[in-house]
């Protein structure tokens, strides 16, 4: 319960916000356990967001998440999942609090700069989707 999975979404990578976002994450008290830049195929994005398959925005989400490289990471902090979701803020940037990552870098509800796992179970599943056990330090 002290780790979460996150990624910087393609629009934020394309706009050179990786450094700014990592700065907010580290200053928020998270330690980077694993980190890499990679790109998802639409099929891989579909698998990652499978829980949203029935939602109306699923197609748009898979397209958006595969349109360019992402930066994937595993983060460590006490109470990591909940604290990270607090640090990134609401899904919709119009509702994101001042000082949150999404307030600073999200462009819309879809292009909202970062992903953060929503449970310890999903953090473990999502981390294993991107990183092997030998890539965690
Ligand atoms: P994640 O950390 O990315 O999982 O975001 P979240 O937990 O705040 O939101 P949720 O899991 O409900 O939705 C997953 C992702 O789908 C969001 O981060 C958005 O990128 C996208 N999304 C959610 N709602 C909408 C929507 O109404 N329209 C569009 N275009 N995208 C949406
Ligand atoms: Mg979510």
Image (spheres, grey):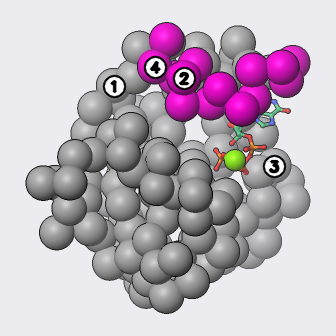
Q: Is residue 94 above or below residue 44?
A: below
Mark 2: secondary structure: helix
Separation of marks 1 and 3 at Cα, in angstroms: 24 Å
The dot on residue 44 is 4
Q: 10 Å neighbourhood of mark 1: few (<14), some, or many (≥20)?
A: some
Name the element at disc 3.
loop
- Of the two numbered discs 2 and 3 in the rendering, the one whose residue sits closer to the viewer: 2
Residue 49 sits inside the magenta stretch:
yes
* Sequence-first disc among 4 and 1: 1
Q: In the structure shown, which secondary structural element does the residue marked by tag 1 occupy?
A: loop
Inter-mark Cα distance, 4 to 1: 9 Å
Quarter occupied by the C terminus? bottom left
Report x, y in % for residue 63: 58, 14
Q: Which mark is residue 39?
A: 1
Picture residue at 71% right of the left edge, 65% below the top: 89
Q: CA distance from mark 2 to mark 1?
A: 14 Å
Sequence-wise first label, 1 or 3: 1
- Residue sitting at 62 percent across and 30 percent down? 49
Q: Secondary structure at mark 4?
A: helix
Is residue 117 toward the left or the right of residue 13 in the image?
right
Which tag, 2 or 3, sits closer to the chain's start?
A: 2
What is the x, y in percent for residue 82? 66, 74
Report crowding for label 3: few under 14, some 14 to 19, many 20 or more residues within 10 A (C-alpha): some
- Which residues lie in the magenta part? 43-56
- Label at residue 92: 3
Is the Cβ of the residue at disc 3 closer than 8 Å to that at disc 4?
Answer: no
């Amino acid at each position: 319960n002290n780790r979460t999975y996150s990624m910087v979404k393609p629009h934020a990578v394309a706009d050179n916000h990786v450094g700014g976002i990592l700065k907010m994450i580290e200053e928020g008290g998270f330690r980077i356990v694993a980190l890499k830049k990679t790109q998802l195929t639409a099929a891989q994005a579909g698998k990652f967001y499978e829980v949203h398959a029935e939602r109306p925005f699923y197609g748009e989400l898979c397209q958006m998440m595969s349109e360019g490289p992402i930066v994937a990471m595993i983060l460590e902090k006490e109470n990591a999942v909940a604290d990270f979701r607090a640090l990134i803020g609401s899904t919709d940037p119009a509702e994101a609090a001042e000082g949150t990552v999404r307030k600073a870098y999200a462009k819309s509800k879809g292009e909202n700069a970062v992903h953060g796992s929503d449970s310890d179970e999903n953090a473990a599943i999502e981390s294993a989707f991107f990183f092997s056990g030998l890539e965690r330090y």
